[in-house]
Amino acid sequence: MNFRRLFQLCHFILGLLLAVLVFCCFFFRPDISENQKENSVLIGASYMTMNNELFAIINEQIAHRVDAEGDRMVLRDPALNVERQIEQIDDMLDMGIDVLVLTPVESGRLTRVLQRAREQGVLIVVVDSNLSESDSGLADCTIVSDNYRAGRLVGEYFLSRKEEAGQEEARLVILTHEEAASGVERVQGFLDTVSGQEGVTVVQKIPCEGKLELAMPRMEKFIEKGIPFDSVFCLNDPACIGAAAALDANGLLEQTSLYGVDASPDAKAMIRDGSIQASAAQFPTRVGEEAADAIYHLLNGEKVDPLILVPVELVTKENVESYSVDRWQ
């Protein structure tokens, strides 16, 4: 190899290394505010997934406040993988975060990494879904929708529709997410309301992680079994929309009652056209605002309530027009 070719090769390698360095700096740096103040606070956020607009809205509210305060924020997406969430939180702790905003993928699997956060003096604000009972003391503040009441509201509406229709029997399918405390509470609130009522039978529970892309094929697989059912309750609207797609593909949508939780824009549009009967509305903007307030109260050494419940409301065809159908409430 002559010197010219060696020089060209070295030049190419140096250029490649520089490109990699620029890439890493751009894509893996924390989101630094233009208004960043001296001695700014670094806030890390890990929601269970960013494949759900609800978390994007919560994060947007927090990020807006962080920017206004001249602080910094870094966001990581575990994509419903608890091992990835643990690894990402460890990485953020290595970065020196002062606050961790967290929605646990699995509420009982984060003990070790949360204890590490506490040992480093990191404040922990949990949103949307509770930690496990044994870990609840590790959080400085938990802000959640009233998930149990969401299930109860939908259950009460389901029973009222059954009674109004003079329906003697109702056969229910329940779509669940057993690893998420919020999903468990919603399902429990619904079941506590409808169980034991005359003529109500739960024929199947289908785990789907609250994901449309899992709810649809698993609902289709259940339909193929030929087990009779007439109603479906889903822990959230993505699962509800997935179930609706499966029912529609099999010609069962018009004869099946569908219920969800979130009152997302897509679900409200489907409530308006009659494809979904009801959804308990969450208010992600308010959850985000409450979380942002809690973060800065804690940073200022002020006391906050350890648990903040954000009220929910029932959205049906009768009142859906009073909500903004094209956006979250």
Image (cartoon, rainbow, N blue to C red):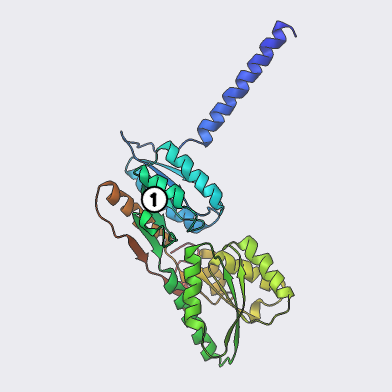
180 or 232, which lies in front? Answer: 180
Q: Is residue 319 among what the camera can see?
A: no
Drawn side of residue 142 relative to residue 267, left or right: left
Instruction: Give the x, y percent position of residue 322.
Output: 43, 72
Tell me residue 231's x, y (percent).
60, 80
Asked if 65 appears above or below 250 in the picture, the reply is above
Residue placed most toward the observer, 141 or 263: 141
* 63 relative to 232 in the view: left or right: left
Residue 226 place in picture, x, y as percent: 73, 79
Quadrant where the C terminus sits is bottom left
User: Is residue 228 visible from the viewing direction of this image?
Assistant: yes
Q: Is residue 297 left or right of residue 47?
A: left
Identity of the residue drawn at 31% across and 34% down = 39
Rendered residue at 68%/13% (across/down): 8
Residue under the point 61% across and 64% down:
208
Q: Determine the secondary structure under disc 1.
A: helix
Camera-nearest residue between 212 and 57: 212
Residue where numbered disc 1 is placed: 62
Q: Quadrant of residue 21?
A: top right
Q: Is residue 88 above or below residue 278?
A: above
Vertically, is 113 above or below 196?
above
Q: Residue at x 40, y 48 (%)?
A: 115
- Amino acid marked by disc 1: Ile
| 131 lies above or below 17 | below
Quadrant for the N terminus in the image? top right
* Residue 73 screen position, x and y as percent: 41, 42
Neighbor class of circle 1 (other Cα within 10 Å; few <14, some 14-19, many 20+) is many
